[in-house]
Image (spheres, rainbow, N blue to C red):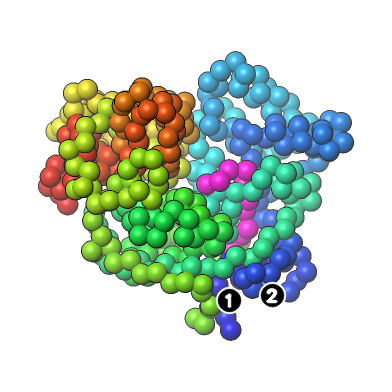
């Protein structure tokens, strides 16, 4: 009986050096650990555990990555003070991979800088650490307590999860489709159908997808309840890594006779544009059923949809058009590197001329940090979540959709099928 992707990587990293399968408990050696702005919380936990100065060491300074995202540049005096403390700890501990004066989302920056490689096991103190699965790596968010243990010993325990295989069949479209796929799955099966499982994406569509869409699939798998999400290694993965890392890596593939808990097939050729209505990720309907709903704000960004392809489709739609009067259209690149990529391609000028507001790279556009909503306002967004209060007011409504649908709504001033606005589809 063969092994799934997660079983293979877990077996490779098992401290006991034995093969493991779904349901087994094991202690795993960690290849990389990512911490963001919450690093000082881990420091305080170390003090409470009896280490007077905080963490006494980092188990392997080459495998620890500290990126001050979410609140960069500092959004308040308290964040600025906290950042000073982080810098002091970085100096004391000899942290080698530290990104401080660079706005961006930690997950995007981890991949920008080649800190994650196929076949590795990487953990982070953020739920959307599942993003690195796009690179054929095993990655997951862990608690601050578990991260404290990882930083001290380079190990952490897991129960090997079962795997759900998702076959994506059909032809690639000329616009990003990954968000619609994840929302479609949530609408059909619920936002917890993958609870604590590993998702393994396969099918004829995968080789046609660029890395930006693969990152979206892996990132938003968290909203389906997944512990891990893995995509296959291929030429697209290798091309992305070229020039980003000079470290060796060992890709992983499932065995032909691997055992899956469940298998789901999605024919994307039959899938409509969709939108998740307030206030749940799985409150999904074809976009036509929400057509005509007036919006006050539109957004593209976050670790799910703040990449080049997501922004390029908005710029392409907006050329020769304007953002509808009364609509605030906010776009935030996921990192400085993505921002630069967009600038070099001329997208920023097109967006500004159309009336878009460009927001500093980072997590603010996804949280109640940038672009608050007032009571009664509605927002359509290609970010990660739409629960009540996510953008401030408990009386505001948030609709989730793909970047193409968001851009179409920004032009029309209301939710609309993108095919009614954009004749290039």
Residue displayed at 35% across by 60% down: 188
The residue drawn where x is 40% and y is 44% is: 280
Classed neighbour count for the residue bearing mark 1: other residues with Cα under 10 Å, few (<14), some (14–19), many (≥20): many
First in sequence: mark 1 or mark 2?
1
Which image quadrant for residue 98?
top right
Q: Secondary structure at mark 1?
A: loop
Please provide percent x and percent y for residue 76: 56, 18
Q: Residues within 10 Å of mark 2 (few under 14, many from 20)?
A: some
Q: Locate residue 372 relative to residue 45 in the image: left or right.
A: left
Q: Is residue 359 above or below residue 172?
A: above
What secondary structure is marked by label 2?
loop
Q: Is residue 189 above or below residue 343?
A: below
Residue farthest along the front direction in this orientation: 395
Residue 363: % across, % down: 48, 34
Point out the residue furthest to the top here.
77
Number of numbered callouts drawn? 2
Q: Residue 209, located in which quarter of the rendered image?
A: bottom left
What are the residue bounds of the magenta stretch?
118-128
Find disc 1 in the rendering and name its residue.
3
Q: Is residue 84 visible?
A: yes
Which quarter of the figure is the N terminus placed in? bottom right
Q: Is residue 348 left or right of residue 190?
A: left
Q: Position of residue 292 (x, y in %)?
A: 17, 38
Image mark for residue 306 = none
The answer to whether 107 appears left or right of 191 in the picture is right
The Cα–Cα distance between marks 1 and 2, rounded to whole angstroms, is 9 Å
Q: Could you say which disc has been placed on residue 19 in the image?
A: 2
Contact check, label 1 and label 2, Cβ < 8 Å: yes
């Amino acid at each position: 009986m063969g092994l799934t992707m997660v079983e293979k990587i877990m077996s490779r990293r098992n401290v006991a050096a034995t093969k493991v399968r779904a349901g087994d408990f094991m202690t795993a050696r960690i290849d990389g650990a990512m911490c963001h702005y919450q690093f000082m919380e881990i420091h305080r936990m170390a003090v409470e555990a009896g280490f007077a100065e905080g963490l006494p060491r980092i188990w392997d300074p080459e495998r620890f990555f500290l990126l001050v995202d979410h609140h960069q540049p500092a959004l308040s005096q308290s964040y600025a003070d906290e950042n000073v403390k982080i810098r002091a700890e970085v100096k004391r501990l000899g942290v080698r991979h530290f990104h401080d004066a660079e706005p961006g989302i930690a997950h995007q920056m981890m991949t920008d800088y080649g800190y994650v490689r196929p076949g590795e096991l990487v953990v982070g103190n953020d739920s959307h650490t599942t993003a690195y699965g796009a690179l054929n790596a095993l990655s997951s968010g862990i608690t601050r307590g578990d991260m404290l243990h990882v930083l001290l010993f380079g190990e952490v325990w897991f129960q090997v999860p079962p795997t759900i295989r998702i076959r994506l069949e059909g032809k690639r479209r000329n616009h990003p489709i990954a968000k619609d796929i994840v929302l479609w799955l949530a609408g059909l099966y619920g936002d917890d159908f993958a609870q604590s499982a590993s998702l393994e994406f396969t099918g004829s569509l995968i080789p046609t997808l660029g890395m930006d869409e693969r990152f979206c699939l892996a990132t938003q798998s968290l909203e389906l309840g997944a512990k891990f999400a893995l995509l296959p290694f291929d030429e697209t993965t290798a091309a992305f890594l070229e020039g980003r890392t000079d470290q060796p890596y060992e890709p992983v593939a499932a065995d032909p006779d691997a055992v899956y808990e469940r298998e789901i097939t999605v024919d994307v050729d039959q899938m409509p544009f969709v939108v998740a209505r307030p206030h749940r990720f799985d409150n999904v309907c074809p976009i036509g059923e929400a057509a005509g709903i007036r919006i006050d704000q539109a957004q593209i960004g976050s670790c799910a949809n703040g990449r080049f392809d997501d922004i390029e489709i908005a710029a392409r739609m907006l050329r020769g058009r304007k953002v509808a009067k009364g609509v605030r259209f906010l776009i935030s690149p996921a990192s400085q590197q993505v921002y630069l990529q967009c600038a070099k391609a001329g997208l920023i000028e097109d967006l500004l001329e159309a009336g878009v507001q460009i927001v500093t790279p980072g997590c603010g556009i996804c949280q109640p940090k940038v672009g608050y909503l007032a009571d009664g306002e509605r927002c359509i967004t290609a970010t990660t979540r739409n629960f009540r209060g996510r953008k401030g007011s408990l009386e505001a409504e948030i609709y989730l959709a793909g970047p193409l649908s968001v851009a179409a709504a920004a032009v029309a001033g209301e939710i609309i099928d993108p095919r009614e606005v954009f004749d290039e589809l």
